[in-house]
Image: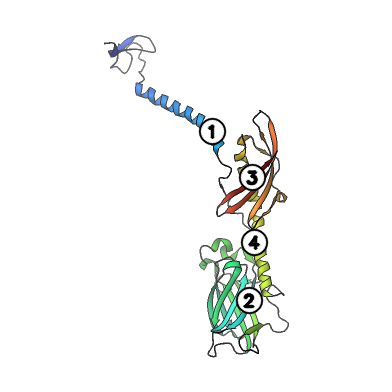
Amino acid sequence: MAGDFITCPNCNKIYANTLETCPHCREKRIGRGCLWIVAGIFGLAVIGFLIGPSEKQQSSPHQAVAARPSIPKSPQTAIMALTAAQQSDGVLVAGRTNLPFGTQMIVGIETPAGAILAQDKATVGEFGRFYAGSFTTKANGLPNGRYVVRVTAALADVQPDAVKPAIGKDWASFLGPLKSAGIVGPVIEAVWHIRWTNSESGTVLKAVLPAGETMPQTNIQWAKDAENARVSARAAVWQAKREEAFYACQTFIKRNLRDPDSADFMTDYNGNLVTKQGEAGYLVLQQVRANNGFGGKTVSIFECETHLSEDSWELDNLKEDN
């Protein structure tokens, strides 16, 4: 039967369909299954080539851009300020600091000779606030006299895992007179020598600094100083992220172009092109030259608004001005 024979593509002679090699020229026969595999691979490659550009064009400029690894920031000065007041159940110590949210501390009241009267744990909360106490004595309060209030931020190694990246190894992210060697390793420690005086009403106690002494790091009201420290710390973080925002906006802009690969950004990073937008956002100006739909180049100026959300940059708004 005709189906029992095939023609050799090399020598054009006929031989049995059951043979794997042509008996005339020894040309090895290519199986039909192999031909289907080759054809299938070729077909997938063609489909991928046709589909690829359309998917690229459909990418949204609003898709998040992964943030770059944070560049180590310069160490900042550790700041702490404190006050205290008598409550119905004892003495409450309250303070503010620029140490990271969640930092664990020990707050103690001592005599000038170093005898510890009471201690309590404290955790840095929102806006750098921390509280300890209420501290009590047999008389449910401290007698008039001189005392030492000592606030110590624990060793970096024993701080919560969420805090460790912000403080660095051995408190490397903080410097200044509040950083000390400690007994077993570096700590942040503030000490206040106070004179404790009962008010005339008998319901409120005030911490009064002895004559000639000032608060560590400051000579202004403690609350105002701590607020300034918080604002300065947030401003430092914002400044450190400006360059990341600049390059994140370049990615958002490219996604908006007809031909992203042709993008030629005409301005290198410049801090003057990045301004604050709202509480934690950035407004970035970019000038880019790219292919248009008529075979030429178009120069456009973009206003890009973005903000950092956890580990990625989010696009808030993108405006083009040709």
- Horizontal arrangement in the rendering, residue 274 relative to residue 43 (left or right): right
Name which residue type carries label 2.
Leu
Q: Are the residues tagged 1 and 2 within 8 Å (C-beta)?
A: no
Dot 2 lies on which element? strand
- Horizontal arrangement in the rendering, residue 152 relative to residue 209 (left or right): left
Q: Which residue is mark 1?
A: 54
Q: Which residue is mark 3?
A: 318
2 or 4: tag closer to the N-terminus = 2
1 or 2: tag closer to the N-terminus = 1
Taking depth in this image into account, of 16 and 101 the one nearest to the observer is 101
Dot 4 lies on which element? helix
Using the image, tell me which numbered label, if any, was put on residue 257: none
- The Cα–Cα distance between marks 2 and 4, rounded to whole angstroms, is 21 Å
Q: Are the residues tagged 1 and 3 within 8 Å (C-beta)?
A: no
Residue 7: x %, y % from top left: 35, 11
Name which residue type carries label 4.
Arg
Using the image, tell me which numbered label, if any, was put on residue 82: 2
Name which residue type carries label 1.
Ser
